[in-house]
Image (cartoon, grey):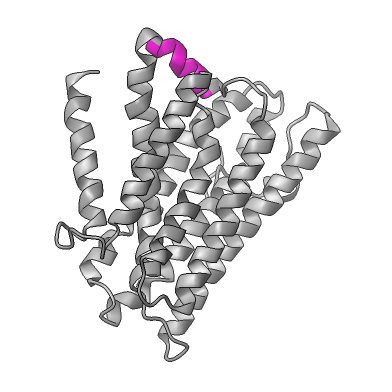
Amino acid sequence: MDKKRLIIYPLLFLATFAIATQGFTNIGFDGLLVPLLFTFIYFTIIFLIATAIKNNSIVDIGWGMGFVIGSWLTLFVTDEPTVLSYIIVGFITVWGLRLSLRLLKRNWGKPEDFRYAQWRKEWGDKVVLIAFFRVFMVQGIINFIVGSASYSIIRFNNFNFEGFSQFVVYAGLLIALTGLLFEVIGDEQLRQHINKKSGKLLQSGLWSVTRHPNYFGEILIWVGLYLSGIPMMFTGAINPIYYGLLVISPLIMSAVLIKISTPLLEKNMEKYDAWEDYKQRVPMIFPWGEKG
């Protein structure tokens, strides 16, 4: 491991701990320490299994369930959960279970995903140590940070069906629901296309308005969930500066999908003859975005 990462990883852990403890001001189980501790334990268990079967790509299968269990644990340690607390937990449960079960079904019995296989080759005999930090702990950190805004809503919100703020909550939940529909419909269209075994590129349905409807849906989900917690900043339920900083939740998810996941996937899509033409006609993620 190079010296730069020896500095970066402790800083990442420190920043994550700061989020869990509201800027080191709530170092106890009244904050988000429960989901944080669980997240690190959970991804360590996945790492041990992945190392045993020599397949680091199973971390993708466990990704969604990390949020599901994290949200339920947060609910269990919340003294007086509101209707909104249960709605957020229910939504994340549906989304996370669907994602993990779909990936489990799709990847069961298949070899390691090409991305992780390439990294295994590059890292050689140091793959176990490097994978623990770069794959499992980094994903654990991202998993917690992305979920932190939702965990905060579950834990601290004082939602009631009164005043203008309720409409902000409804708008956020509607955006999240729209994102989930994009994922469900986009994945189903892709499944049907793959079953046809045409060997051609899918360019119809939602795939005609964005090259990655599932990624677009994912971004909408986390943006929507974050927005549903905005009223907490004005009701004294949470420190407004702290929740304002938690905008990192949808931002980091968006950055990972746009800057990491999409380029890796699109490089693999270049094998299709129609790819270049498709890329010039359809925006990458956002339907209103630039093409090419």
Against 132, is 34 above or below?
below
Left-right relation of 173 to 4: right
Q: Which residue is drawn at 48% across and 27% down?
A: 49
Looking at the rendered image, the quarter that the N terminus falls into is top left
Magenta stretch: includes residue 45? no
Residue, x 63% and y 50% (percent of image)?
98
Does residue 51 lie above or below 248 as drawn? above
Q: Is residue 210 visible?
A: no
Q: Looking at the image, is 129 positioned above or below residue 172?
A: above
Q: In which quarter of the image is residue 110?
A: top right
Q: Where is residue 289 in the image (x, y as percent from the top left)?
A: 52, 50
Prevailing SS of the magenta stretch = helix
- Whether residue 219 can be seen here: yes
Q: Nearer the viewer, residue 262 or 69?
A: 69
- Quadrant of the image containing the C terminus: top right
Q: Kindly identify the residue that appears in the image at 49 percent across and 35 percent down.
A: 261
Q: In this view, does 93 lie to the left or right of 104?
A: left
Q: What stretch is highlighted in magenta?
A: 115-123
Position of residue 240 measured from the top left corner of the image (x, y, whole percent): 24, 71
Q: At which x and y percent is residue 239?
A: 22, 71
Q: Taking 234 as reference, is 192 left or right? A: right
Quarter where residue 284 is shown: top right
Q: Residue furthest bottom?
A: 162
- Dividing the picture into quadrants, the one containing residue 113 is top right
